[in-house]
Amino acid sequence: MGQGLLTPVLALRDGALACEGVALDTLAEAVGTPSYVYSSAAIRDQFRQLDKALSGIPHRIHYSLKANANWAILRLVRSLGAGAEVVSGGELYRALQGGFAPEDVVFGGVGKSARELGEAVEAGIRLVNVESEAELRLLDGIACERKRRIPVGLRLNPEITVDSPHAYIQTGGKGHKFGIPYDDGLSAARLAASLPWLELAGLDMHVGSQLAVLDAYERGLERILSLLEAVRAEGIDSIRYLDIGGGLAVPYEDERPPDLRAYGRIVRDVARRSGLEILVEPGRFLVADAGTLLTRVLYRKRSGGREIAVTDAGMTELLRPSHYQAYHHIEPVRPRQRVTVRIDVVGPVCESGDFLALDREMPDIEAGDLLAIRTAGAYGYSMASNYNARPRSPEILVDGDRYAVTTDREEYQDLIRLERHTLDWKNP
Ligand SMILES: *Cc1c(COP(=O)(O)O)cnc(C)c1O
């Protein structure tokens, strides 16, 4: 099933799975479990595939930090030529710390605070994608105070329904919280063009995540193009960028990967008709498949007729199964058993919703077995939490037959680092 279709980020070597040249069981001995392991080669490969699909089109790939923002990965994607896309002041800070030049950063998000907008103006980034008229006015005021003009894009809600596997990752339908409603696009453009400290430099859409079927995407772009025409008809000709968002899908189970050639054709057509530079904001596509979450089976038990394996990783390390009912392929790092079972693979957190897989048919596993949870490079560590006072797990980057720890495992002291033990009472 799914197994055969996943790209071979992991391969069997001497009876155990290896990430590039690094055997996962040896690695787990060295760094412990749970831990996240990322393949540099896989990230490079995805980047090059996308870049190739866009060849001949004036474009820039802005990596969406929220998928996975550790310093080593930022350095890697930056070395490949990517810019950054951030959705918070914290991510802007990370991007700049990670070595991105301010002019390589695009800032999006539905709820940017005055402080965050001020930081974007201060840094002098490439583009702030604005999601309402109120935000346009706020940003203009902030830019005025600092006497720095700031390029803005308008994030439009094209109001299309996309075929995405879970409602929580659709963002471009009517009534969604994201973007400027399509019918208000022209008046928002007039406002942006009239505000003295803003430069209307782009139009933007991001219609959701895990988009494998591209026709809705294409319909969204058509609507943005007609708006562009209407804006230009009013004599507003400052727009340079068309930001077409992220959302490219990766296969988790047995889905077909997105057709990059079809994607390239759509984008090429839009670039030609608009005459604009295209910005794309992939997150998941670049890093998801590269990542594996290593976890060990702590206990095997049976309850109410169900087979259960309790692992040392759960929703605190990988929220996607419980939050989005997402599928992640799970396989033993050293496959021994030929017998398959139907089993619930569950985490140690005190929540019934804490599971990695329910009723999964897979090779039988025992306490002590090491498991590889696939496609965990995006929205794994970046959505990790300390719930149940669980220290966050380390991140490891593999390159050829070498590995390096890029993020240390948290210690218990880290969990209470911000708490005060003497209370400094004040009267307001
Ligand atoms: C999350 C997000 C992305 C990246 O989405 P992926 O599905 O990971 O490619 C891009 N742009 C914006 C505005 C986002 O919020």
Image (cartoon, rainbow, N blue to C red):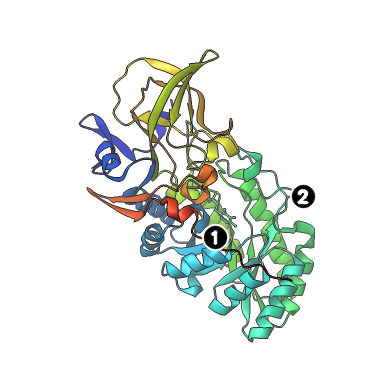
From the top left corner, tell me how far across and down residue 300 is, in percent: 42, 22
Residue at mark 1 to residue at mark 2: CA–CA distance: 46 Å
In which quadrant will I find the N terminus?
top left
Q: Residue at x 72, y 74 (%)?
A: 138
Q: Earlier in the sequence, mark 1 or mark 2?
A: 2
At horizontal 48% and vertical 65% (from top left) the residue drawn is 94
Where does the image place residue 121, in percent across and percent down from the top left? Answer: 60, 77
Residue 336, horizontal then vertical, whole percent: 29, 21
Give the residue type that dot 2 points to. Answer: Gly
Q: Is residue 165 placed above or below 48 in the rendered structure?
A: above
- Name the residue carrying label 1: 421
Dot 1 lies on which element?
loop
Specify the quadrant of the image occupied by residue 227.
bottom right
Most extreme residue toward the left is: 14
Residue 88 visible in the picture = yes
Q: Which residue is mark 2?
A: 175
Binning the other alpha carbons within 10 Å of mark 1 as few (below 14), some (14 to 19) or many (20 upward) gives few
